[in-house]
Amino acid sequence: MLPGAVYVWEYVEGAIREVCRRYHYLEVRTPIFEHTELFERTTGETTDIVEKQMYTFRDRGGRSLTLRPEGTAPVVRAYLEAPERPLLPWKVFYLGPMFRHERPQAGRFRQFVQFGVEALGSDDPALDGEVIALACDLFGKLGLQGLSVHLNSIGCPRCRPSYRQELLAYLRGQEGLCADCTRRVEVNPLRVLDCKEPSCRALVREAPRPVDFLCEECGRHFAAVRAFLERMGIPYVLDPTLVRGLDYYTRTVFEIMHGALGAQNTVCAGGRYDGLVEQLGGDPTPGVGFATGLERLIATLELEGRVPPPPRELQVLVVYAGEAARQAALDILYRLRASGWQADIDYLGRSLRAQMKHAARLGAPLVVMVGEEEMAAGEVTVRDMLSGEQLRVRAGDVDATLRRLAPAG
């Protein structure tokens, strides 16, 4: 990622931090790699992540380590291993690189940056709504349009077994499933609903729907989530085939999609995972969250023309004529930086004429010129590169002169 592109990332990261601050989600940072068992226990041994995508290796002590493929399990581990048990609900966000060995696709690379939020400690449906609202607020702050929230409930361990049996009976009678889904039918049939192969997508349209098998408690929870979104004025689409690709999800699942992205149109995805903390050895602790890949999010911003213009990287270039003036120019440079100016100087020994051409190529709006004549008089020349105005001022008045000439912004 080269300097010309980094400003877009800083812009998005700044929006993320601002929205999370307003929602009182604090930043947590977890290691780049974790013990492999963490992901095998939480994401599920039959998921694509564990079966095909994890970068796993053994360290010098023979321990199996994995570059983190997702952020939720590491956050839960951090919660469990915190020196003092955090106050509940524990609302945090993370922002950093993840790694999956998969075919590179639109907005997704084998090393990619992911932002996510996690809220642990409450099963309140309003918290499900809050994380969806946070995502929508972030996208709104970035100016994105054309997004749609897709919503479903996949039930809990009490009501899911009956649904699993119905789904299993349906899938066993189908032909045309891909090789992966043919195997998944017996080990984890719910994963078939998440398959992106066109043949499988066509078959699951007629499959039994998880929402039709919800127990009374899950039904009330889902109705409350929907009511919250409606009160907040957040439109959504009921998507009965929507599931998440990780085994730890329960009840609410959602994705936020952008139709113009084509087949890989999910910008954000998440849901509830009430059994994950207990699965990792903690007390029963409900949780809910989401994640979004920044590469795909930035691609969406570019598609909509929502990327801001690059900021001015340089305000002042100090140029000098001759070696004798160089030290005086360096002194002025560091005084300007101490006063808050984005300032630089030529380090290639160019002629004064070449330095001025370099200032134009850099887009520096202001230039401070130091020559032997100016040095003798204790003065410098300040040039406004936009208007062509040129002023001879005392060296001590450079800062005030620049501030008067500096373009707005």
Image: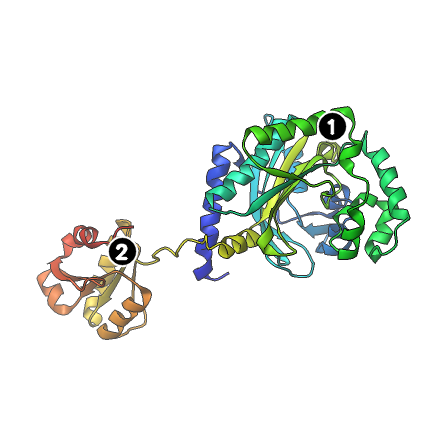
Q: Is residue 78 visible?
A: no
Q: Is residue 255 left or right of residue 324?
A: right
Q: Residue 32's mark?
A: none
Nearest to the observer: residue 30 or residue 213: 213
Q: Residue 218's mark?
A: 1
Q: Is residue 283 left or right of residue 349?
A: right
Q: Say what amino acid the circle numbered 2 marks.
A: Tyr
Quarter occupied by residue 286: top right
* Image spot of residue 55 (x, y percent): 70, 56
Q: Say what amino acid the circle numbered 1 marks.
A: Cys
At a point 54% along the width and 48% down the height, the residue shown is 146
Task: Indicate which disc, 1 or 2, sits on the residue closer to the N terminus.
Answer: 1
At a point 80% along the width and 32% down the height, the residue shown is 213
* Image spot of residue 133 (x, y percent): 55, 35
Q: Residue 334's mark?
A: 2
Vertical placement of residue 283 versus 363, above or below: above
Nearest to the observer: residue 57 or residue 100: 100
Helix or strand or loop: what does disc 2 sit on?
Answer: helix
Mark 1 and 2 residues: CB-CB less than 8 Å, in contact? Answer: no
Quarter occupied by residue 270: top right
Q: Is residue 165 left or right of residue 62?
A: right
Instruction: State the CA–CA distance, disc 1 to disc 2.
Output: 64 Å
